[in-house]
Image (cartoon, helix red, strand yellow):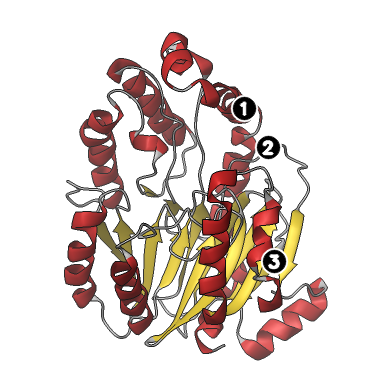
Amino acid sequence: MNRLKRRKFIQYLSFIGAALPINVWAKKLTNTPAKAFNFMLLGDLHFDKLMHHDMDYLKEKYPNDIQQIENYSRITRDNLSSLMRVSKECAIEINAKFFLQIGDFVEGLCGSKELAAIQTNELINYVDQQEFNLPFVAIKGNHDITGIGAKEVYQEIVLPWQSKQLQQPVTSANNVYVHNNARFILFDCFNEKDSLPWLRNVIKEHKKDEQLFFCTHIPLIPYDARSNWIIYVHPGQEQYRDEILNLLARHKAIVLSGHLHKTSIVARNTPSGNVVQVGIGSVIPSLNAPVKHHLTGISAYTTELVNLEPDFSLPTLQARKDILEKEKPYIRHYEYADFCGYGTVNINEYNEVNLSIFANADKAAWAHINLTKLFNV
């Protein structure tokens, strides 16, 4: 990522064709071909209110999550409105075509189907109240289906909501959304047995002149202390992970992921080429939260990443180190920082993908990067 002063940065972009700052994007869009477009990218939101939960249920089944629920309820109350307001302003300024939210839009763990329905409907109503006047595409996160009745609520409320947003039938969390010259594979990473055969089939529809985005709540490529929080990580699944990595590499897919509430850009090599992955979170602890642990360069990708969270899951410490050690030879680009916020994605007239990342609810971008160039590092 390049941290150049504004004037110098704009001159640099005119030379390499990378992402433009928001106010320049807005001026340029009117002069670009119809296929060029922008969209908004949001990570985990964990929409929550204490009244959404049966506290006796939590004390019995999820006592370790009570503090987290209290925190997410505070974040929803104090910070979410600022994130939504700034995201809406940004969407208008860059003429975004839709919002893509990468899972865990609610906290879940409500304790009954009735409370889960209330929480989910309140989130949907909250999104409607923002008057984005744009589709709000939300993929499945683990919290969206956790707790009594949550899976039923997902089927009965979330899928019909997403059908309206996508303006197409949605009967599963596995879905495909196409906009202009970009194809979005919305992947259900909590149904691994069925999702991989589904992926093998639908990826065949990807056209050579389309940019492919693989949207998964849980990352595919490990990048921090929780290196075991990736899909197809369990013993006996190695062949499936290798298959999906090579499949995405052949199609030059950009992976959009959440779950870890961190920011990262990773390029991983395979025998079929590179896979590029973005990690993002939108659970903003405070509007002036600092950016912590900013790491850059492949030399920073070591087993020492486990020390970013020294107290996390000590019984899995060696296993997490082993995962990072195994991945390290394949890493071609690495940047990581501990913060949440939002992003904008531009597919330009050359079919290049440019990402701008914003910390917290800031209006000035923290960084910009041309993701397409990472296929060649």
**Mark seen at residue 71:** 1
Residue type beneath disc 1? Asn
Q: Residue at x 50, y 55 (%)?
A: 41
Q: Residues within 10 Å of mark 3 (few under 14, many from 20)?
A: some
Q: Residue at x 64, y 48 (%)?
A: 340
SS under mark 1: helix
Task: Tell me how far mark 2 sits from mark 1, CA to CA.
Answer: 8 Å
SS under mark 2: loop
Q: Which residue is mark 3?
A: 367
Percent from the top left, x then y, of residue 214?
A: 37, 65
Residue type beneath disc 3? Ala
**Mark seen at residue 16:** none
Q: Nearer the viewer, mark 1 or mark 3?
A: 1
Q: Residue at x 64, y 65 (%)?
A: 303
Which quadrant holds the N terminus?
bottom right
Q: Which residue is mark 2?
A: 285
Please say if the residues under marks 1 and 3 sit with CB atoms less than 8 Å apart. no
Residue 7 visible in rendering: yes
Q: Residues within 10 Å of mark 1 (few under 14, many from 20)?
A: some
* Mark closer to the chain start, 1 or 3: 1
Drawn side of residue 269 relative to residue 243, left or right: right
Which residue is at the front of the view, 96 or 100?
Answer: 100
Percent from the top left, x then y, of residue 314?
A: 60, 45
Which residue is at the front of the view, 4 or 232?
Answer: 232
